[in-house]
Image (cartoon, rainbow, N blue to C red):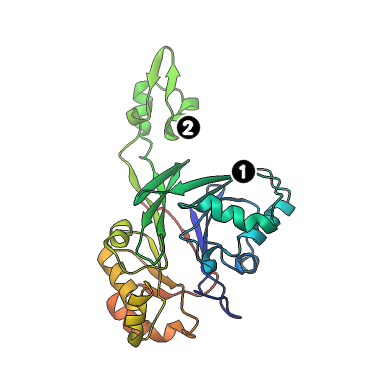
């Protein structure tokens, strides 16, 4: 099961009723935060989640509305006596930017590890899932992210019994580990069927529509995409500022074949994004004008 919470949905500046865009996901004991604008900590508290177990923080880019909440977040984590290392992932320059922000949070009881992205597409593997960063088209270097939970093949009991593998070794094979018994090595492919469909969440803000977004979002269970503007008259502004309208996001969702799209990163001028959804849904039916704190538990498909 993959827990997903869109902590905030605002772009540019926090508002009394809308925090800045930030996404938190939890899977198998690990927590991943993408972007950390001003107010992210409050949004997290409103959700009832804690920053203490955050293992990874990813950044799309270094505009203030996506990173200005980081010093306070780090201090909170430090005050909770965290000692485990924290991994940060972001575009080139990450360490320089974070260290500059840490002038007001210089002493922390944990190590920060940096992974700077330089490729147009880059995959980072973890235990049971991977993150995939991909370049998008903003007025500074900016990345979108995929969170993909892998699902191995189904354990085939009959094969395990036929091979005479003792029951106590089955769990290791299910986890993808080799097993040695009575001088013979057994590998997972001997008892596992073909790989099954996992879970995929695609997150993208601050970009014009691109083929890269469409390709990386293909068949996503959830596509979280900026809908900066809802008024069609703002199309030229979206182009000039390298942002996206709700209708452009809907077209991406449709062409990528995603299951559901949540709009986010609204302009402060968009007071009620739901007012535009009738037209958006004409393009892509399974569209949602997300609000702060919207969450879902994604589960593997039943077989």
Residue 76 location in percent, x, y? 70, 57
Give the mark, 1 or 2, whose residue is nearer the N terminus.
1
Compare residues 56 and 208 and report the one nearer the observer.
208
Compare residues 248 and 221 and report the one nearer the observer.
248
Q: Quadrant of residue 241?
A: bottom left
Q: CA distance from mark 1 to mark 2?
A: 29 Å
Disc 1 crowd, CA 10 A, few/some/many (<14, 14-19, 20+): some
| Residue 6 seen from this side | no
Residue 71 location in percent, x, y? 64, 59
Disc 2 crowd, CA 10 A, few/some/many (<14, 14-19, 20+): few
234 up-or-down from 156: above or below? below
223 up-or-down from 108: above or below? below
Count of picture labels: 2
User: Judging from the image, what secondary structure is the residue with disc 2 in?
Assistant: helix
Q: Tell me what residue is drawn at x 56 percent, y 77 percent.
A: 18
Residue 4 location in percent, x, y? 50, 60
Q: Tell me what residue is drawn at x 36 percent, y 55 percent.
A: 134
User: Judging from the image, what secondary structure is the residue with disc 1 in?
Assistant: loop
- Please give the residue where the numbered disc 2 appears in the rendered image: 171
188 up-or-down from 262: above or below? above
Residue 221 left/right relative to 104: left
41 up-or-down from 250: above or below? above
Q: Tell me what residue is drawn at x 50 percent, y 26 percent.
A: 168
Is label 1 or label 2 in front? 1
Q: Which mark is residue 181?
A: none
| Residue 189 seen from this side | yes
Residue 166 location in percent, x, y? 45, 23
Q: Give yes or no for contact between labels 1 and 2 (Cβ–Cβ under 8 Å).
A: no
Q: Which mark is residue 85?
A: 1
């Amino acid at each position: 099961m993959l827990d997903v919470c869109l902590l905030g949905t605002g772009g540019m500046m926090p508002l009394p009723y809308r925090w800045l865009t930030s996404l938190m996901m939890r899977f198998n004991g690990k927590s991943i935060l993408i972007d950390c604008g001003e107010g992210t900590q409050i949004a997290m508290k409103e959700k009832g989640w804690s920053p203490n177990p955050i293992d990874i923080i990813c950044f799309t880019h270094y505009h203030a509305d996506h990173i200005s909440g980081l010093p306070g977040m780090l201090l909170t984590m430090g005050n909770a006596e965290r000692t485990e290392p924290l991994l940060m992932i972001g575009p080139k320059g990450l360490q320089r930017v974070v260290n500059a922000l840490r002038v007001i949070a210089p002493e922390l009881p944990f190590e920060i590890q940096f992974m700077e992205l330089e490729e147009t597409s880059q995959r980072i593997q973890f235990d049971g899932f991977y993150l995939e960063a991909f370049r998008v088209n903003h007025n500074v270097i900016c990345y979108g992210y995929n969170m993909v939970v892998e699902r191995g093949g189904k354990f085939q009991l009959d094969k395990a019994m036929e091979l005479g593998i003792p029951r106590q070794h089955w769990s290791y094979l299910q986890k993808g580990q080799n097993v040695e018994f009575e001088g013979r090595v057994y590998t997972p492919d001997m008892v596992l069927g073909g790989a099954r469909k996992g879970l995929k969440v695609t997150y993208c803000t601050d970009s014009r529509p691109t083929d890269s977004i469409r390709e990386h979002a293909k068949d996503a269970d959830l596509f979280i995409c900026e809908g900066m503007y809802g008024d069609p008259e703002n199309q030229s502004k979206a182009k000039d500022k390298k942002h996206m309208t709700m209708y452009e996001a809907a077209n991406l969702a449709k062409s990528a074949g995603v299951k559901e799209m949540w709009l986010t990163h609204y302009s402060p001028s968009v007071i009620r994004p739901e007012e535009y959804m009738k037209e958006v849904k004409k393009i892509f039916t399974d569209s949602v004008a997300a609000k702060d704190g919207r969450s879902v538990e994604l589960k593997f498909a039943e077989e």
